[in-house]
Image: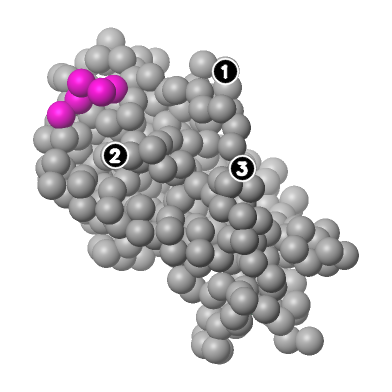
Amino acid sequence: MDLRFPDYPFTKILGWSNSRYDLFCLCKRKYLYFYYSSSFGKLESKIKDLKNLTTVSLEIGNIYHDMMEVFLERLQKSDAPINEQKLFSYVDNLCAKKLPQKIFFENYYNKINVNFAEISEKVKACIRNFLNSPILEFLNSIEMTQRKLFLVEAGSKMYGKKYFGETRIDGIKAYCKMDFIFVKDGKIYILDWKTGKKDEHKHTKQLYAYALAAKCLNSEIKSEEIFPKSVYVNGAYDELSLIVTDERLIETTKIIKDETEQMQKFCSNIEENIPLPVDIFEKSQRESVCRMCEFQELCSG
Ligand code: SF4
C-alpha cells in the first residue's frame, strides 16, 4: 500500500491543529502573540524571541523525538542488538550540541541554571522504557522489507521535501504531523511519542485527527484498518490505543469543523487570516497559566 503525501497550493486561511486549538482555549492573548505577532508592530521581534524560549520538559521531548528518528532509521537497516552504551553516549553528545544553543524559560524568567546532564539522563530513562516496551517488540517483528516503508516523523524528509503535516479534513485545512506512520500487512499504524503526562481526552482527539489525515494518504484504506497509538515513556510505560470507526471519524470531523469556526470568528478576514483588533483577544485571568507563559513580560506591563 502506497501512502501519498499530496502537495497543497499555498493558502493564507488558518489551518486547524490540535495544539493551535489548545492554545486558543488556554489564553486568547497568548494565541494572538503566538500566531499573529505582526499585530503588535514594533514588538514583533521581541515576541518572536520569546516564542523561541524553550523549557526543560520541551527539550526532553525534542531530544527524545530526535533519538527515535535515529533509532527507527537504524531499525530499517539492521537487526543487530542495540549497544546501549553507544546509544546513550549519542544522547549525551546530542544534548551537549543542541542545548547550549537554546534559551530556557527557566533561566530567562526564574534565573534557574538548567542542568543539561539531568535532561540527558531523563531522555535516557525514556529510551530505556522504549527499549523494554511491547511496541519495540512489535516493530522488531516486522519484516525488513516492510520496514523500508517506515515514515519517521511522518515524512518530515518525505521525497526530499520539508513536510509539516498539512492535510485536508473534509475540505478544511489542517496540520496533523504524525511522529511515525507505517504499513504492516495492509494496515496503517500511527505512533505518537509522549514524554509528558497522559491526557486521555486531549490525546484521543489528536489520534483520531491523525487517523483522518491517514485516510487522506490513501483513499482505499478503511477506518478499521488504521491503528493510532500514543506511547508514554516518561515514568511507567503506558499506551493509549484507539479503535477507529467511520462513526468516530465523522464525529472528529465535526469537532474539527467546529473548532476551526471558533478560531475563524477571531478573524476580520477569514481567507486572508487577518485577526480582529488586539483588545478582542482577552488575557487569561488564571495566575497559574500566566506563570508558565513565555510572553508574561509583555502582559505584566
Ligand atoms: S501572560 Fe497570561 S495573559 Fe499574558 S499571554 Fe501569557 S497566559 Fe495570556
Above or below: residue 42 compared with residue 135: below
Local secondary structure at mark 3: loop
Give the distance between the C-alpha atoms of the residues marked 3 and 2, in whole angstroms: 22 Å
Residue of label 3 = 12
Expressed as whole percent of the image width and height from the top left, the position of residue 114 reads: 66, 67
Q: Residue at x 28, y 22 (%)?
A: 218
Residue nearest the viewer, comparing 125 with 77: 77
Residue nearest the viewer, comparing 273 with 146: 273
Q: Main secondary structure of the magenta part?
A: loop
Residue 78 visible (yes or no):
no
Which residue type carries mark 3? Lys
Above or below: residue 173 compared with residue 256: above
Expressed as whole percent of the image width and height from the top left, the position of residue 19 reads: 47, 57
Which residue type carries mark 1? Gly
Which residue type carries mark 2? Leu
Q: How is the image coloured?
A: one colour
Q: Residue at x 75, y 79 (%)?
A: 297
Q: Residue at x 27, y 31 (%)?
A: 215
Q: How many marks?
A: 3
Of the 4 image quadrants, the one containing the C terminus is: bottom right
Q: Residue at x 27, y 39 (%)?
A: 211
Residue nearest the viewer, comparing 247 with 87: 247
Residue of label 1 = 160
Point out the tag, 2 or 1, that comes first from the N-terminus: 1
Expressed as whole percent of the image width and height from the top left, the position of residue 153 reads: 45, 34
Expressed as whole percent of the image width and height from the top left, the position of residue 17 reads: 45, 51
Residue 228 visible (yes or no):
yes
In the drawing, does residue 292 fall left or right of residue 175? right
